[in-house]
């Protein structure tokens, strides 16, 4: 039976729950060739699945003295053992120091991997054993303390990162830290990652270690979305060299940033149509790519930028604001004169950029208010039942982009009759019909198929429960946590956009869901002026360049991206004009006002701001057309 057939016998549901997105040998060969795996004398994949990446290394000429792998899933591990007889293939939890101690090496020439992107906070996923978040962190810290790092600096950085990464982060964060720690000084790290992952807040410890202990050689992005045809997000390859602090550092390496276009793969290789008439397309491609000579590829096939090592920073993997802005201005400068100008970002204007509210149990907490406001329609989990409820408990909310009237059930001031005694007189008693609904909810299953739990037992609902202490009243599962300012913003914008991102006003009255990026204006920039800036063609073009594109063509925006949005430095009079124009848009069709907004923002950039707006619009529309084709 072939390896592909063996792998396909593993149940898809289990693979998905374990974060097993098997890489495929074609991608393994490309990553291995770019990492020059044939020079490595020791290679390991710490979370190897069935071993596709290791197979890719061997197929591009690697012949290491030591080949290693760890895999937590027994069946996938058995497949890997059949593929690599004589290799050190361990079954177990890669974070466990006892498992790591069974490896022949502690530090490796090449650590290659596709970290599992899966939530693991509660441990067992389905019926498959996976350590919970607390155990993973404890094991990782113990393993890091056992590593014999050449430099104390490395030990300090890795331990600090392992102690401080977010408890809500997916498994890939500790997996990346472990992989990085296993690279010997002068060795290489080669990872497959989602395109936008390292720009997220919870991956900051990874970025810190990369910036300090590694030098990135290559960031390659799958603009075509063809590497993982069923994945929801685009993928990138990251190759970095572990710094050797025992040797004098002469100069920082240049970085290559490569975008892979469509139509360059064939059935045997992801670059098979780019490098023809050869039996080693990946190796030949890598040689040409690393060469500083001109390359025979069209820009729509392969787009390459070399970032000068003297000024290059290792992060982020997403195009950073400076490079994106320079790219946009360079294209703009091909058509209109562009002035040097100063930029500020939203934090300079005292605007807090964050993410909205997570209920933990949407089936229960999100409801549809009736027109008279003294009742609500429950979700489909309760057959859309109508429930009488005082209006004070039905809080207006924005959950998604459908524009429907929505609300959250805010029961922080009332308790079920059976909870009155334990409430110590802090709360009123819940009305009878509402009480019946809450009791029914306590016996209702919620969650994804195969992982359903009773609503009070959901991980993000259990944390609502709190016993009375030090003058603080008790809290019950049906009580939402107190809202934070970011949950009640001035302005919000969707995180996932099929078309142009459109901001909206919330006026601190609406509870806004985590499907949206939220903004609080705490300085001289008013919410209306912020609406004007976010609605501008400048912002649209910038977001189309910096945002990640899902496999289906939707644009994914992160709060960290918008916090870095470069805004031409504005005078107060310009801000005042933007506010007036944004206000007028709410009462008119808005096309003339939108033009004036663009003119105000761009007049400091170009002497012909309307011409500049036209070019920016064309740039944004071109990117929108490209990603829209994926939605069909």
Image: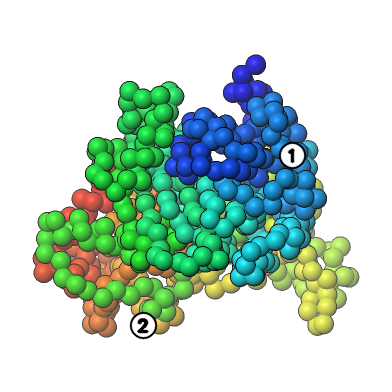
Task: Find out whether the residues at labels 1 and 2 contact each other: C-beta distance under 8 Å.
Answer: no
Disc 2: which residue:
524
Question: What residue is drawn where x is 41% and y is 33%?
Answer: 282
Q: Is residue 142 left or right of residue 230?
A: right
| Image point (77%, 73%), residue name | 427
Q: Position of residue 413 (x, y in %)?
A: 71, 71
SS state under label 2: loop
Coordinates of residue 179 in the picture (x, y in percent): 62, 52
Above or below: residue 632 compared with residue 611: above
The image's mark for residue 30 is none
Residue 146 percent across, percent down from the top left: 75, 60
Q: What SS does tag 1 mark?
A: strand
The quarter of the rendered structure image containing the N terminus is top right
Percent x, y for residue 321?
A: 36, 63
Sequence-wise, the earlier of marks 1 and 2 is: 1
Q: Quadrant of the C terminus?
A: top left
> Which of 339 and 268 lies nearest the eye of the viewer?
268
**In the foreground, 424 or 552:** 552
Q: How is the image coloured?
A: rainbow
Mark 2 Cα shell of 10 Å, populated few (<14), some (14-19), many (≥20): few
Number of disc labels: 2
Residue at 38% in and 78% down: 348
The vertical placement of 242 against 264, above or below, is below
- At label 1, counting other C-alpha atoms closer than 10 Å, the crowd grade (few under 14, some 14-19, many 20 or more) is many
Q: Is residue 315 left or right of residue 87?
A: left
Residue at 61 percent of width and 43 percent of height: 42
> Mark 1 or mark 2, which is nearer to you?
1
Label 1 vs label 2: CA separation?
59 Å
Which residue is labeled 1 in the image? 90
Q: Is residue 630 visible?
A: no
């Amino acid at each position: 039976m072939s390896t592909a057939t063996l792998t396909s016998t593993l149940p898809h549901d289990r693979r998905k729950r374990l974060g097993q997105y098997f890489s495929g040998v074609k991608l393994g060969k490309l990553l291995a060739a770019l990492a020059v795996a044939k020079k490595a004398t020791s290679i390991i994949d710490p979370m190897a699945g069935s071993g596709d990446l290791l197979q890719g290394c061997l197929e591009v000429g690697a012949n290491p003295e030591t080949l290693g792998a760890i895999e937590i899933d027994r069946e996938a591990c058995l497949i890997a053992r059949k593929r690599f007889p004589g290799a050190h293939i361990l079954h177990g939890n890669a974070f466990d120091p006892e498992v790591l101690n069974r490896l022949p090496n502690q530090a490796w020439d090449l650590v290659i991997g596709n970290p599992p992107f899966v939530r693991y906070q509660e441990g067992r996923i389905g019926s498959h054993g996976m350590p919970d978040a607390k155990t993973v962190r404890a094991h990782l810290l113990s393993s890091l303390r056992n590593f014999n790092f050449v430099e104390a600096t490395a030990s300090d950085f890795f331990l600090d990162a392992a102690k401080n990464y977010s408890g809500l982060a997916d498994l890939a964060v500790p997996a990346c830290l472990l992989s990085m720690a296993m690279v010997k000084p002068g060795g290489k790290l080669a990872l497959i990652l989602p395109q936008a992952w390292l720009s997220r807040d919870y991956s900051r410890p990874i970025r810190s270690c990369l910036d300090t202990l590694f030098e990135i050689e290559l960031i390659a992005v799958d603009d075509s979305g063809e590497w993982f045809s069923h994945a929801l997000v685009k993928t990138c390859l990251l190759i970095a060299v572990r710094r050797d602090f025992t040797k004098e550092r002469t100069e920082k390496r240049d970085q290559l940033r490569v975008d892979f276009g469509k139509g360059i793969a064939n059935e045997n290789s992801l670059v098979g149509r780019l490098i023809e008439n050869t039996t080693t397309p990946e190796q030949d491609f890598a040689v040409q790519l690393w060469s500083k000579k001109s390359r025979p590829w069209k820009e729509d096939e392969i787009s390459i930028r070399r970032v000068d090592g003297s000024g290059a920073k290792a992060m982020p993997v997403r195009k950073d604001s400076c490079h994106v802005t320079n790219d946009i201005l360079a294209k703009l400068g091909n058509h209109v004169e562009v002035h040097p100008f100063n930029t500020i970002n939203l934090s300079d204007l005292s605007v807090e950029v964050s993410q909205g509210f997570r209920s933990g149990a949407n089936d229960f907490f999100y409801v549809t208010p009736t027109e008279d406001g003294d009742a609500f329609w429950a979700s489909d989990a309760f057959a859309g039942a109508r429930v009488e409820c005082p209006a004070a408990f039905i809080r207006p909310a924005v959950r998604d982009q459908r524009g429907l009237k929505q609300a959250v059930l805010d029961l922080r001031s009332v308790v079920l009759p059976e909870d009155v005694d334990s409430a110590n007189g802090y709360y009123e008693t819940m009305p009878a019909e509402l009480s019946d609904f809450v009791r029914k909810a306590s016996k209702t299953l919620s969650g994804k198929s195969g992982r359903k739990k009773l609503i009070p037992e959901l991980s993000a609902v259990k944390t609502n429960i709190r016993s009375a202490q030090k003058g603080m009243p008790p809290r019950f599962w049906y009580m939402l946590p107190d809202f934070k300012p970011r949950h009640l913003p001035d302005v919000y914008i969707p995180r996932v956009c099929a078309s142009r991102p459109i901001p909206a006003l919330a006026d601190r009255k609406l509870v806004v869901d985590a499907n949206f990026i939220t903004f609080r204006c705490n300085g001289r920039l008013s919410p209306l002026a912020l609406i004007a800036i976010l609605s501008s063609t400048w912002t649209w073009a910038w977001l189309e360049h910096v945002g990640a594109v899902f496999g289906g063509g939707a644009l994914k925006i992160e709060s960290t991206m918008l916090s870095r949005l470069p805004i031409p430095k504005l005078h107060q009079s310009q801000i005042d004009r933007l506010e007036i124009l944004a206000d007028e848009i709410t009462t008119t069709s808005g096309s003339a006002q939108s033009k004036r907004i663009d003119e105000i923002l761009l007049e400091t950039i170009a002497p012909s701001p309307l011409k500049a707006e036209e070019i920016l619009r064309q740039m944004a529309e071109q990117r929108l057309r490209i990603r829209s084709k994926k939605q069909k």
